[in-house]
Image: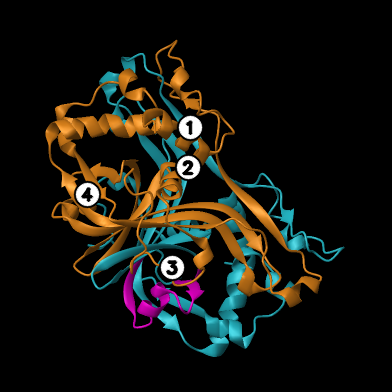
Chain colours: A orange, B cyan
């Protein structure tokens, strides 16, 4: 990568809690590549919308999709400024004062101008890429996308102009005077994990889980699994 | 409640997947009250921002907070249109075609005009309310907020003008012709759970977890725990 960090700008400068800021691409991209969903903010006639959606990254560009009919995609076809935010919740932090209650988290805000992908063959490529980003090798195993499906699917791309990460990963942090109070204070970890796969009831007998998907085993952390899947499909 | 459903409007009407829409307050509020974090979209000089933050509900109003110095709060003091979105990820859905890959989720988009809370005593009340919404009874046990902390904390309130929920909770749903393909297809549940509490290393000896917080036991689902906590502090 030519630049290994994002510039700190008026959009991404942290107004407070500077120690939580992360601008190096390695950290920002790990937070993005560990996530299934992003929340995408965009503006239509002055009204903000915040839409949760699946997304993924190729290089310095984010992609997401939805039906060509959805409001978000139609409005973004002209090229709209958007903010794509990804958040992982890692712990609840119960302090000795309300003021110092907190959560541990890893988040990224990425800014750029989103545009529709219109090229038909690029859309077919992206349909496979999205599946493979999540589930390595899966586009080989499933029924290929049809032209009609590609038409019905709107893909949006957003080159990342600016991005910043934010991480809180410490323990309870109270005012010095408060540590003597007889108050129970703790960090409670939060994990997002996979359960045991529930096979489709109509599956053809003998259709086994492919070896490529063995990483999706019950009990594993979703973020670690998605990051491993990402690096399998997009090696460094 | 006078009205048990939100009206369907241009903001909240689903353009597609109408069967996923939920407009009754009971469903919309359960989705909100089960969540720790919301993503809040707002606009500053045409630029959208999407900020993850802790929040909670009182009646038909949402509240959230942050340092008075944060960009979001400063800009919202004038009363800004915002969109507050909450999303729970419940499962990954691996179908026999890329087109029908999906996720199970519960989400809410709530729209309204956000305003700063300026009354000093109301701010002190909200500091306790936020802690108690998450951790029933905790404001009794901890060091009370100071006037200086209340000054440094900006609270934003947003009466909910409109809101809509969206839920996908079904299994793999493929094109009829594709069910005969010898492809492994499955739903993989995703759960966000609490780990065992990690006591603050500087805790005064003998400070035990209060009975009120026993619901935060390791292994429990975060959404169920937060909903139970909510109803303890805000009985129906």
Write the residue at 18% across / 37% down.
Answer: A152
Q: Are marks 3 and 2 in contact (CB under 8 Å)?
A: no
> Is B80 part of what is drawn in magenta?
yes
Q: Which residue is mark 2?
A: B90
Write the residue at 43% across / 58% down.
Answer: B28
Q: Secondary structure at mark 1?
A: strand
Disc assigned to residue B188: 1
Q: Nearer the observer, disc 3 or disc 2?
A: 3
How far apart in space, not on screen, are marks 4 and 3 (Cα)? Answer: 33 Å
Mark 3 nearby-residue class (10 Å; few <14, some 14–19, many ≥20): some
Q: Are marks 3 and 2 on the same chain?
A: no
Mark 4 nearby-residue class (10 Å; few <14, some 14–19, many ≥20): some
Q: Quadrant of the C terminus of chain A?
A: top left
Q: Nearer the observer, disc 1 or disc 3?
A: 3
On the rendered structure, is B142 left or right of B164? right
Label located before the other in sequence (4 or 3): 3
Q: Are marks 2 and 1 on the same chain?
A: yes
Q: Secondary structure at mark 3?
A: loop
- Image position of B146 with respect to A161: above or below: below
How far apart in space, not on screen, are marks 1 and 4 (Cα)? Answer: 26 Å
């Amino acid at each position: 990568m030519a630049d290994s960090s994002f510039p700190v700008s008026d959009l991404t400068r942290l107004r407070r809690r500077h120690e939580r800021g992360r601008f190096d691409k390695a950290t920002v991209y790990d937070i993005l590549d560990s996530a299934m969903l992003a929340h995408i903010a965009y503006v239509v006639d002055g009204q903000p919308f915040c839409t949760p959606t699946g997304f993924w990254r190729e290089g310095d560009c984010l992609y997401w999709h939805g039906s060509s009919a959805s409001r978000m995609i139609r409005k973004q076809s002209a090229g709209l400024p958007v903010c794509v935010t990804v958040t992982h919740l890692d712990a609840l932090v119960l302090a000795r004062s309300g003021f110092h209650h907190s959560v541990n988290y890893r988040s990224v805000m990425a800014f750029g101008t989103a545009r529709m992908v219109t090229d038909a063959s690029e859309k077919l490529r992206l349909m496979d890429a999205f599946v493979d980003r999540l589930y390595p090798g899966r586009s080989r195993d499933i029924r290929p996308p049809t032209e009609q499906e590609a038409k019905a699917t709107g893909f949006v791309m957003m080159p990342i102009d600016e991005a910043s990460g934010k991480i809180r990963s410490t323990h309870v942090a109270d005012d010095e005077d408060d540590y003597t109070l007889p108050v129970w204070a703790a960090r409670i970890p939060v994990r997002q994990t996979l359960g045991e796969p529930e096979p489709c009831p109509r599956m053809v007998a003998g259709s086994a889980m492919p070896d490529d998907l063995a990483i999706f085993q019950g009990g594993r952390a979703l973020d670690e699994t998605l990051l491993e899947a990402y690096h399998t499909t997009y090696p460094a």
